[in-house]
Image (cartoon, rainbow, N blue to C red):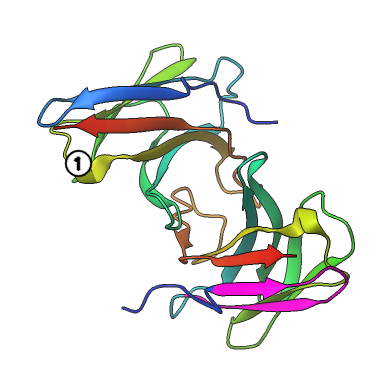
Amino acid sequence: DAKTTQPPSMDCAEGRAANLPCNHSTISGNEYVYWYRQIHSQGPQYIIHGLKNNETNEMASLIITEDRKSSTLILPHATLRDTAVYYCIVRVAFSNYQLIWGAGTKLIIKP
Amino acid sequence: KAGVTQTPRYLIKTRGQQVTLSCSPISGHRSVSWYQQTPGQGLQFLFEYFSETQRNKGNFPGRFSGRQFSNSRSEMNVSTLELGDSALYLCASSMTGTSVRNEQFFGPGTRLTVL
């Protein structure tokens, strides 16, 4: 079973920041948080990952709470092309354990 | 750098038949994973191959099998197809599968329809 909980859907206005929450209350100390997204009819795409510090890359920012029980993915200036299903996943680093995918959040960017 | 390629992109089979799907990973990637995606079950892990050996396996019946060749290309086979096998089959490759980043690069998938 997936170890994360996400809202099934969210809306965001184009040009605004999209904030996608994820609950992972049972996360272990050696588990990382990964975010992927899947645009309709395409394979999932890696976005970002983190352990306990906030992370930022060219696509998004990841904010992890101090107790690590939840995180938020931030798309700073959402565009229509960001409409996709976003998956939050936890995984032990340096292991062969595969990613276990939940249902994700369907993010719809509106003009 | 070429991405992950999967062939064929679309396939229609009938119950009882068998099917073979192919995946070519990104050059230099040695880990190939297969996933099944259906509207009801979401993305489910089938198996992972690394250096021609199956390293991980999900909870699927023995009708689902795979292999990896010395050039890291991988095939998966489904025998005695059932209606419930209709799904998008995704292949993902990564360098080793055990790095912290574990960035898996996904192919576009093969859409299998079983009639």
Would you say A91 lies left or right of A7 here? Answer: right
- Residue in front for this viewpoint, A110 or B49: A110
Looking at the rendering, the stretch of residues picked out in magenta corresponds to B10-25
Q: Amino acid at mark 1?
A: Leu
Q: Is residue B26 above or below residue B95?
A: below
The image shows residue B111 at horizontal and vertical percentages of 58, 65
**Residue A105 visible in the shown view:** yes
**Quadrant placement of the C terminus of chain A:** top left
**Quadrant placement of the N terminus of chain A:** top right
The image shows residue B4 at horizontal and vertical percentages of 45, 72
**Residue B57 visible in the shown view:** no
- Residue in front for this viewpoint, B45 or B110: B110
Question: Which residue bears the numbered disc 1?
Answer: A80
Characterize the magenta stretch by its predominant secondary structure: strand
Q: Is residue B18 above or below residue A108?
A: below
Would you say B87 lies left or right of B97 here? Answer: right
* Residue drawn 88% across the image and 71% down it: B16
- Count of numbered circles on the image: 1
Q: Is residue B3 magenta?
A: no
* Residue drawn 66% across the image and 64% down it: B113
Query: Which quadrant holds residue A102?
Result: top right
Around disc 1, counting alpha carbons within 10 Å, would you say few (fewer than 14), some (14 to 19), or many (20 or more)?
Answer: some
